Amino acid sequence: MKLRLRTLALAMAAAGAAGAMGVAAVASTTSAEPIQPIVRTPPADRQMVELGKKLFFDPRLSRSGFISCNSCHNLSMGGTDNVRSSIGHHWAQGPINAPTVLNASFNVAQFWDGRAADLKAQAGGPIANPGEMGFSHEMAVDVLRSIPQYVDEFTRVYKKAPLDIEQVTQAIAEFEKTLVTPNSRFDQWLQGDTKALSAQELAGYQLFKGSGCVACHNGAAVGGGSFQKMGLVSPFKSSSSSLGRYEVTKQEADKYYFKVPTLRNIELTYPYFHDGSAATLHDAVDVMGQVQLGRRFTADENDKIVAFLKTLTGDQPAIVLPVLPPSGDKTPRPQPFN
Amino acid sequence: MKLRLRTLALAMAAAGAAGAMGVAAVASTTSAEPIQPIVRTPPADRQMVELGKKLFFDPRLSRSGFISCNSCHNLSMGGTDNVRSSIGHHWAQGPINAPTVLNASFNVAQFWDGRAADLKAQAGGPIANPGEMGFSHEMAVDVLRSIPQYVDEFTRVYKKAPLDIEQVTQAIAEFEKTLVTPNSRFDQWLQGDTKALSAQELAGYQLFKGSGCVACHNGAAVGGGSFQKMGLVSPFKSSSSSLGRYEVTKQEADKYYFKVPTLRNIELTYPYFHDGSAATLHDAVDVMGQVQLGRRFTADENDKIVAFLKTLTGDQPAIVLPVLPPSGDKTPRPQPFN
């Protein structure tokens, strides 16, 4: 136990780690690496998770009846939509790249600018955003309250009627907390399987640590623990108008600060950066080297780092598609075209 | 065996049954009812089905990278999108209601106007339709050929490279053939469980048979076996400009003929009719009575028929969401906004 705690302290120190990282995840390794294996913990309330899964996949939380959480955080595609910026209500172009929902519970806060403290607070955002799901909390709740099987299920889970938006967002958040991706090859290596990585991948990891990437991309989620300036060493030219953390704090010093994204499953979550401007991992590593570290990686170095990054793809959540309860006769119908 | 064949012949006669109905499904019942239990048969090629499932869920078959087969044939929602007409590329409004993909292999042909002979022929349609997925077969194949894991999987399944659109549509069709929904309460009743239906539901079934609905809605899929005129007894006023079967045959006599939709899982596949104009089952039964049968069902009759129709909801396919292979560095990127 003493050894374990000491190892934990070392790991936390090495990582410059924020409290948002799962302590359980850290404690499970005996290594002092700045990255810890990610661990899936059993949900506290399975019924709530099942309800949240339905809501996550239910496009009736949007005005059109067409867009669900899964539309932009597609669990077939690393919890993202793999486009530069998302498509919203009436084909609105989103202002920012959709971050992955996988391992999002490890983030210090949600959204690129951290404007939501946690997953529950985040879940309400897109529903009411005119350029995303284009609905309102009131209308979404009205729809759900009109669906008999949902009413029954909410009552079973919460023992409190009528259902409300707090229950809706809590259930979605509880489902999202289960979207953790353990057992990547890198985690296998962290846990002692020395053959889990090739020489090239291991060289990539050494470069990743040695050149400073790990200063921000650390902890169980290999990121997600802090806000950092995009364009730390040289300006990052972007088509996005987002000012990042400044939008929340209105502090001049927070301009262009964004939440450091997780690198877990990064092979699946292209394109990269808050503006989705890097189409490939090679592009992303190249730009990061220049604007964050003031360094031009050689092609060989770039290849090695990319090879390492691809070892961070973990077991994707095994999602059995929910069967959604049918609308009742009085359920307000979606309005996709007006 | 003799008895079985005679029963089969009776059932076929009672149903006015088309060849499209699965004979296996009919033979499994010993009843002479005009509806037969629906039976899920094991797929011929599981690897092809798995590949087809990936393709069914892959939005990279659309120009935007946002729309997959599952967008409009959502397997969480009875294989439909539950809107009057579908949302396509750039939020295009579709001309017709998306029919369910569930049990679609039992249809005499595909699309409301039957312009595709089978599921394989159907699968290519939406990909290249400018108002649906907005892509082309060539571009879709280019995308798939650039994704290393797909190339491997197609080669494993087809033993023939390079992959082509025929392979793509065949795999999707083979997946769709697995989307069969057995074990509805009505099927349990057909198979001898006399307690599976309530008195009201059974009365609804008797009305369904006695008033003529069953003339078109029969067989294992309770429909899907023939084309019939929408507005047989009195004109059906529609906002849709579709002329139905006429669009295919250009025969005057085929105007306003549409494929009879399956009533399997009808509780889940609202809104109803080719124009999606009936929001509820009560509406649909009312209109059908008037325009097809020249009859006004009383509220009590309507309730009974609706109660019966809801017994046709079968076990929904248990779909484990596929994990899609990531795009390669050279994969053409989706173009949602230009």
Image (cartoon, coloured by chain):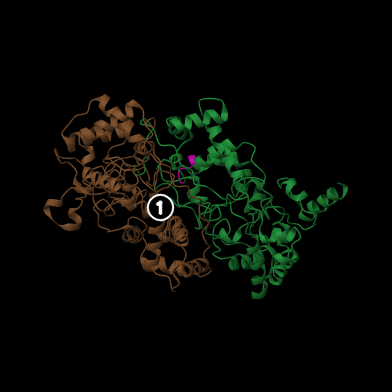
Chain colours: A brown, B green
Quarter of the image for residue B170 reads top right
Quadrant including the C terminus of chain A: bottom left
Residue B176 place in picture, x, y as percent: 58, 44
Quarter of the image for residue A232 reads top left
Residue B173 place in picture, x, y as percent: 58, 40
Q: Which residues are magenta?
A: B127-131
The residue closer to the viewer here, B37 or A229, is A229
Q: Is residue A306 above or below residue A224?
A: above
Q: How many marks?
A: 1
Q: Residue furthest front?
A: A2
Can residue A338 be seen here?
Answer: no
Q: Residue furthest right?
A: B2
Q: Main secondary structure of the magenta part?
A: loop
Quarter of the image for residue A271 reads top left
The residue closer to the viewer here, A214 or A298, is A214
The residue closer to the viewer here, B243 or B110, is B110
Q: Residue at x 34, y 40 (%)?
A: A266
Does residue A275 show up magenta in the picture?
A: no
The chain ID associated with circle 1 is A
Residue B212 place in picture, x, y as percent: 73, 63
Query: Residue beneath label 1, please?
Result: A41
Residue B136 place in picture, x, y as percent: 46, 36
Q: Secondary structure at mark 1?
A: loop
Q: Image check: A44 left or right of B164?
A: left
Q: Image check: A192 left or right of B28?
A: left
Can residue A163 be seen here?
Answer: yes
Q: Is residue B141 above or below residue B19?
A: above
